[in-house]
Amino acid sequence: MISLGTSQLIDFAYIVAIALFILALKWLSSPATARRGVLSGEIGVGLAVVTTFFNPGLIQYKWIILALAIGAMVGIPLGLVHMTAVPQRTALSHSCGALSAALIGIAEYYMSLPHVSRFEMTEIALEVIIGSLTFTGSLIAAGKLQEILPQRPITYRGQNFVSLSVLGAAAVIGISLVLNPNYTHLFPAMVIVALIFGVLLVTPIGGADMPTVISLLNSYAGFSAALLGFVLNLKVLVVAGALDGSSGFILSVIMCKAMNRSFTNVLFGAFGAVQVSKTKGEEERTVRTASPEEAAAILGAANAVLIVPGYGMAVAQAQHKVRELYDALTRRGVDVKFAIHPVAGRMPGHMNVLLAEADIPYDKLLEMESANSELPQTDVALIIGANDVTNPAARDEQGSPIYGMPIIEVDKARTVMVIKRSMSPGFAGIDNNLYYLDKTFMLFGDAKSFVNDILHELSGGSPG
């Protein structure tokens, strides 16, 4: 029997952890295997953490245990938030990961002085800059998602010039430190400028772009962790960070493609700015409304119903009532499916997670392309709290700020019903012509309450 040394056992455990990370990404790509992917990722992280304790270079275990205890005290409450708060919780997680990477990079710089090579300084500078801007950028994103900060873009004349100038200043300081790592007075300035850029990066971005921003910040946090792995000569951190960074970047590309927009447009286009109506007449158009009783009658008489969930459903925490509606209609022989837009909600996959929490069958969730192919044969399209992702202006009006963004074409269904609190516009700040069509019925009210009222009528008036 071959006896392996401690170093070889550590390397082997790290390889197993890396394999689990890769499997987690693979399984997370499908709702049917997502739980397995989460479990795989958790085991991989746990294995990597425990293995690190056996590193011969570790001396002071008490500080690590203290940090783990503090992290657990913060992390457990964050993990118990409602599903509607997951996007901002995710943004906070990104900020914590980025902050830890930046702080360790700062510590490595001062511990290595005065013998910091140019190559090491390059690694540290990149890691600290990316970690610092990701930290503040993620905090701003969390503030917007929590509605502590304005969700609409905060813009001013020349903002892109100012933002790029600040980024350029961070780069110049970083290069100066690479050329002479002993310019210690420049290091704090580099950190502060990077922190400022993170604020400037996310502040002009509107709520409609938050799914892309969240995935992009995830990418930045991953890359900062990978760079930290180079600084610490920790291979498992390099691989884990690279996987996180690359997957986040690819997801951001997918999000941009889903909105038919470029990275530069997302980062510098201030999408979500309030738009002024073109004519006064647009504000005076009338809409058709329906009561819960009328909505129940329409749904009960349909053969095929397509439900389009949006952030309004998440805010109302109506996903479980929507599941009850699905069950009630299915028992009546109605074919009920769900159309999921790639950027619905406030983070990638937000709607999928909410519906999975309510145990909606995976095979009833349709991606946008599949849903659009079925809508012409659909009797009723029921929109619950979705706005911009169903706006025909994205397809029909070249002057619209959302023109070109792929939408779920609910206007092709025979009847459209929209559960919405009011006629206020979505995050793009523009009117939705869908609401004024002859085939559209507006169901004004809280999503959870209105769906419950529909269930009450479908059950023959018995308590819902």
Image: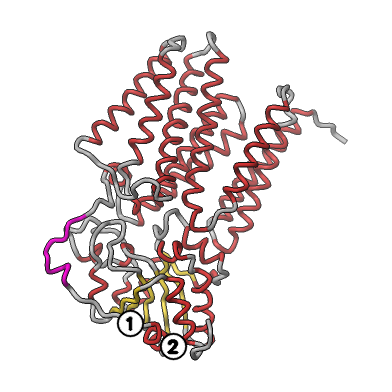
Between tags 1 and 2, which lies in front? 1
Which label belongs to residue 300?
2
Q: Is 174 colored magenta in this rendering? A: no
* Amino acid, disc 2: Gly
Q: CA distance from mark 1 to mark 2?
A: 14 Å
Residue 322 vertical position relative to residue 279 in the rendered view, above or below: below
Of all residues, the one furthest to the right in this rendering is 1
Q: Position of residue 247 (x, y in %)?
A: 49, 46
Provide the residue span drawn in magenta: 275-284
Q: Secondary structure at mark 2?
A: helix
Q: Nearer the viewer, residue 4 or 328?
A: 328
Which residue in the protein does label 1 denote?
A: 290
Q: Badge 2, how many Cα within 10 Å: few under 14, some, many 20+?
A: many
Q: Tell me what residue is drawn at x 40 percent, y 15 percent.
A: 186
Q: Tell me what residue is drawn at x 31 percent, y 27 percent.
A: 166
Q: Badge 1, how many Cα within 10 Å: few under 14, some, many 20+?
A: some
Q: Position of residue 177 (x, y in %)?
A: 42, 15
- Which quadrant would the N terminus be assigned to in this image? top right
